[in-house]
Image: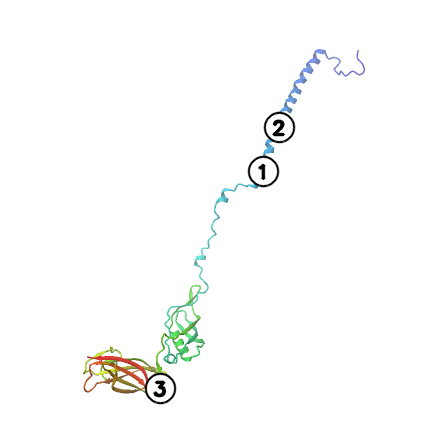
Amino acid sequence: MAGAGSCDHRPADAKPGEARAAAGAIAPRGDLLRARNAVAWIAVAIALPLAGSCLAADPILQQSPVPSPTALLPPPPPASDSTQSLRLPSYVPPFKLTNQPPTFPEEALCRQLTGQTKLVLTISPTGSVVDAVVEKSSGHPSLDSAAHDAGMDWKFRPAFAYGVPVGSRTRVPVDFIAPAEWPHCSQGVRVLSTYTVLGAEGTDTGAAMLTPMFAPSDKVSAVVEYVVTSPDAVGESLSVRWIYLDDAGHPVVRHEQTSPLQEGGRKRFVLACALPAGWKPGRYQIEVRLKDDILGQGEFAVR
């Protein structure tokens, strides 16, 4: 007899054997679910440690990054400009090739003048000097003139603008320095040289050889080269003395001649002397004087 709270829902017409068969059919499906759940938990248990190790390794990789192979190679050279090697400087100044110093003026030598003259030279594209201007004077016109004349004769490598020769200007100082020994000048005259040659008075001795030795019968010519450094000396005369030196070295004047001074640069006169009785063998001196000042001397011998 069935009570009102019975939970048995089997159909009324179900038989006991069929009920037991239905319960046996449901059991295998529950076991399958439990097996699937177990496998899932095992997979989770295995995956979690692996995921944890990967997460822990990421900061290390960020702190010490491994360089790529290209980072180990040296940086490539900068790109070369094909026109850079052909680029020329915008300006190259002129360069002096010849430096012939100026001639020290005779007047300045006699007056012992020194100084510096500053020139401004105008140079053509061919390197020649086409103009010279005294920018700063030495204080002595003769030195400035000599510097100007020398500058006009100099040669330069011209200036270049982008490889093309161009005209230019340059400043050049010209120094006039005292020589080791100042020449002896007196009363506006400087004797440059005194020597003897074999010949007659008035002979051109430009190519003559110095003759220091003569025979007793020779005609000896004294050649005196001089320059007048002051116009006040014009009209004066140079005297030439022929002096014999005896065995003791004492001078004995054997002959004396004079020649008037001429201005106009380097001058030369030739005085010939032939003693009627011939030259006495021995040593001789030629002494050039202006009044009482000795301006030059020369020597020769007779054998």
* Residue under label 3: 233
Q: Quadrant of residue 183?
A: bottom left
Q: Where does residue 253 sit, x and y in percent of width and height?
A: 25, 86
Q: How far apart are the alpha carbons under marks 2 and 1?
A: 21 Å
- At x 59%, y 39%, the residue is 59
Residue 202 shows up from this direction: no
Q: Where does residue 108 sit, x and y in percent of width and height?
A: 39, 79
Categorize mark 2 by other alpha carbons within 10 Å: few (<14), some (14-19), many (20+): few
Mark 1 secondary-structure assignment: helix
The label on residue 58 is: 1
Residue type highlighted by circle 3: Ala
Q: Does 78 sit above or below residue 6?
A: below
Which of the two marks, 1 or 3, is nearer to us in this view? 3
Nearer-the-camera pick, 19 or 257: 257
Q: Quadrant of residue 199?
A: bottom left
The label on residue 9 is: none
Nearer-the-camera pick, 168 or 274: 274
